[in-house]
Image (cartoon, rainbow, N blue to C red):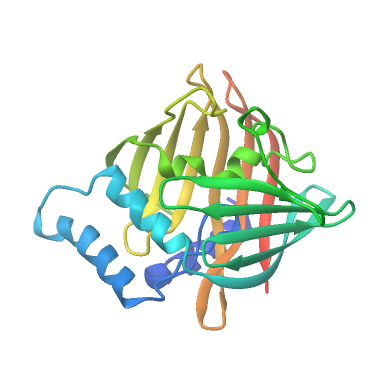
Amino acid sequence: MTNDEASSNAQMTNLGSTTLSVLGLPQTFVIRYSSFVIFSLFALTIYGEPRPSAQDVLASVRMQQSMQRLDLRGQLREDNLVIPFRLIQTGPVIRYAFENPEEVLQLRLGENSSRLDVVSDTATTRVRASNLHQKIRGTPVTYADLALKFLYWPDGVVLGEETVRTRRCWRLQLRAPSRESPYSNVLLWVDEASGALMRLDCYDWKGQLVKRFEVVSGQKIDNRWFLKQMRIEEVQPGPNTVVARTYLEIKK
């Protein structure tokens, strides 16, 4: 474990009402109704009731994802390569703005599905399913990763509970509804207390691990907790050797 990773464990103990998620999409309790829904959902286990369904957990995550108004700076960093971007969110619409060359990716979170577009001065073009596997700026992050389609997959199950960086999480297995997805299934760890996405393991159609996302640390901005650093690993199928490691970092 690196020094950064060790120090981050202390930060993770403060995530009871935090703001952390995959790919820089923050989550926090900003509306009393949403807090009540999350509390009611996860409090079931305190009294020995059945665990929530995968669809209940995913619905709570989607609800939290669509409530933010943000304007933050971030970067993708792989060794000496640094790719800055700007993260702008207005409710269910999230934009990633890159420079050199200029590119704007817009994610819209709907009730039943998400849509990822490439936005220019003249047109807004939807990213086709056949292009979802393409990498962004040569990093392990793909269009599919930004699209968050797995949050809408209907075939899922809660496998149990596990701890990720001191946080008690629900562990879910989600199966892709069709081969349009580059991933056949995804293992997802969701913080029970905050609804934050803490870890994501992605498998190809041969059932082999090919990608892993994991929150490394958080930060406090304007009295709210946000993602500070996430590690993204591209894995060679079979031997499970990490062939590329990129860090997604969010700054104020």
Is residue 168 among what the camera can see? Answer: no
For the residue pair 114 and 222, the one nearer the viewer reads as 114
Is residue 118 among what the camera can see? Answer: yes
Residue at (76%, 50%) from the top-left corner? 123
How far across and down, in percent of the image, does residue 99 sit? 85, 57
**101 shown above or below 138:** below
Q: Is residue 9 left or right of residue 101?
A: left
Residue at (47%, 62%) from the top-left corner? 66
Residue at (62%, 46%) from the top-left corner? 116
Residue 157 figure quarter: top left
Name the quarter where the C terminus is drawn.
bottom right
How far across and down, in percent of the image, does residue 134 sit? 71, 33
How far across and down, in percent of the image, does residue 88 sit? 66, 66
* Number of numbered tags placed on the structure image: 0
Q: Residue furthest right?
A: 100
For the residue pair 228 and 106, the one nearer the viewer reads as 106
Q: Residue furthest bottom?
A: 222
How far across and down, in percent of the image, does residue 36 sit? 25, 70
Q: Is residue 51 left or right of residue 104?
A: left
